[in-house]
Image (cartoon, rainbow, N blue to C red):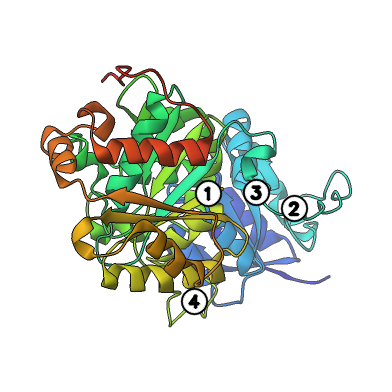
């Protein structure tokens, strides 16, 4: 009989002493370590000596990221459920396939020896064949109600946040249910810009729910309603809290939000991979990985840069960098702060950008600082701050992007 090397973590649960006795009595199991918490469990798993882990399903800190980490280390899992109903459902959401009721923990040795080579459940049917390639099929076409629009741009404050807020406000003004997501890993400012002073981060709350497998039930509670059709998922309260967003959590919440309507995402400026990488394969968060994850989840991307020579040079380089990351996603280039004093016309800018990478159109926004200042000082959306050249340009951008006609003049979103 082969011997299974086991890690045990229960943080003092009532069934722990019986589990220890069951492991000691069974000839096919050897207890490598009794771990004190999730962090201790992961550290022991990364040594490569353990083959299985026995853990309480209600263990504090146990989430989808921990389960994925154990699986990457080749550690199979047996969950012990004190409440068979709730605990078994939670285990299923986290991906723990083998669950043992606490009153049956005496059978633990036999259950461990009988574990399959992987703890993933077998597929119920053969996987479907891959779909035929499409030229520009959006994610929303796959039976989803909305789509994810990600606003990204290079360093230099080209206006990512202003564009994201303006775009979301215009979509909501047209009667479309819209969620505005602040996913800037360097500390977003959407909440402050829109006059929301809550200290609670909607992004951190939602990603924790995604990791715990309860996002569907409680996602709405993480959002702040701004108007009848517009909600905000606020960003990081401090720039140093980016490690709390585990890889994959943003993708999960964007997929969930897409099922309910339009999603506009404000991001950071950098997408270059960490030069040091993740050699241990631990799934460690990466600061700019949050922006890359948003771009990879996007149905449409708005690449924004300023109209001055430095901004256009950065914009051209960013377009090539973006195409290296997401070669098939629809990308619209937005040239911001266009003004006559620069000495060139819109056709000149479009011709310049035509040779720097594939895109789905160039849109030009005027330099309208007065309109931006009015909205910013009042803590309101551009569409709520009166008519302006910038608001009209945003409406034309939404016409091209969403294909939704504007409402009659005078129709305004209401707080």
Question: What is the quadrant of the N terminus in the image?
Answer: bottom right
- The residue lying at 86 percent from left, 52 percent from top is 129
Image: 174 above or below 53: above
Please give the residue where the numbered disc 2 appears in the rendered image.
Answer: 134
Q: Is residue 162 left or right of residue 76?
A: left
Q: Position of residue 223 (x, y in %)?
A: 36, 32
Q: Quadrant of the C terminus?
A: top left
Q: Measuring from the top left, give residue 390's x and y in whole percent.
A: 27, 41
Marks 1/3 in contact by CB < 8 Å: the verdict is: no
Residue 17 place in picture, x, y as percent: 54, 51
Nearest to the eye among marks 3 and 2: give it.
Answer: 2
Q: Residue furthest right?
A: 126
Q: Is residue 288 above or below residue 135?
A: below
Counting residues from the start of the chain, the first of labels 3 and 2 encountered is 3
Sequence-first disc among 1 and 4: 4
Q: Which residue is mark 4?
A: 278
Q: Which residue is mark 3?
A: 96
User: How far apart are the alpha carbons under marks 3 and 2?
Assistant: 35 Å
Report the disc number at residue 300: 1
Nearest to the observer: residue 381 or residue 250:
381
Q: Is residue 153 left or right of residue 77?
A: left
Spatial separation of the CA atoms under disc 1 and disc 4? 29 Å
Res. 283 in view:
no
């Amino acid at each position: 009989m082969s011997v299974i090397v086991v890690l045990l973590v229960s943080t003092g649960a009532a069934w722990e002493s019986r589990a220890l006795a069951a492991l000691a009595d069974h000839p096919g199991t050897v207890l490598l370590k009794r771990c004190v918490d999730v962090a201790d469990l992961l550290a022991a798993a990364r040594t490569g000596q353990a083959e299985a882990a026995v853990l309480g399903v209600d263990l504090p800190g146990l989430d989808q990221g921990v389960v994925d980490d154990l699986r990457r280390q080749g550690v199979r899992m047996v969950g012990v459920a004190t409440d068979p109903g709730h605990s078994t459902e939670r285990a299923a959401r986290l991906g723990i396939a083998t669950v043992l009721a606490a009153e049956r923990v005496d059978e633990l040795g036999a259950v461990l020896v009988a574990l399959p080579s992987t703890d993933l459940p077998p597929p119920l049917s053969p996987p479907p064949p891959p779909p035929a390639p499409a030229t520009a099929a959006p994610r929303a076409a796959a039976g989803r109600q909305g789509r994810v629009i990600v606003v990204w741009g290079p360093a230099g404050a080209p206006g990512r946040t202003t564009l994201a807020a303006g775009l979301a406000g215009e979509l909501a003004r047209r009667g479309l249910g819209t969620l505005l997501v602040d996913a800037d890993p360097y500390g977003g400012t959407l909440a402050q810009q829109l006059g929301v002073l809550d200290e609670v981060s909607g992004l951190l709350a939602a990603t924790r729910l995604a990791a715990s497998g309860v996002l569907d039930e409680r996602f709405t509670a993480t959002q702040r309603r701004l108007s009848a059709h517009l909600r905000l998922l606020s960003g990081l309260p401090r720039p140093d809290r980016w490690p709390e967003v585990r890889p994959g959590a943003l993708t999960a919440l964007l997929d969930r939000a897409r099922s309910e309507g339009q999603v506009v995402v404000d991001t950071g400026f950098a997408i270059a991979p960490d030069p040091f990488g993740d050699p241990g394969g631990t799934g460690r968060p990466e600061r700019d990985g949050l922006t890359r994850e948003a771009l990879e989840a996007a149905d449409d991307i708005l690449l924004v840069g300023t109209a001055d020579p430095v901004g256009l040079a950065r914009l051209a380089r960013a377009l090539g960098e973006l195409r290296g990351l997401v070669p098939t996603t629809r990308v619209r280039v937005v040239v911001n702060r266009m003004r006559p004093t620069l000495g060139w016309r819109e056709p000149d800018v479009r011709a310049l950008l035509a040779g720097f990478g594939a895109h789905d159109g160039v849109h030009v926004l005027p330099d309208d600082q007065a309109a931006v200042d009015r909205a910013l000082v009042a803590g309101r959306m551009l569409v709520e701050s009166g008519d302006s050249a910038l608001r009209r340009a945003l409406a034309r951008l939404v016409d091209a992007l969403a294909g939704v006609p504007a409402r009659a003049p005078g129709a305004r979103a209401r707080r």
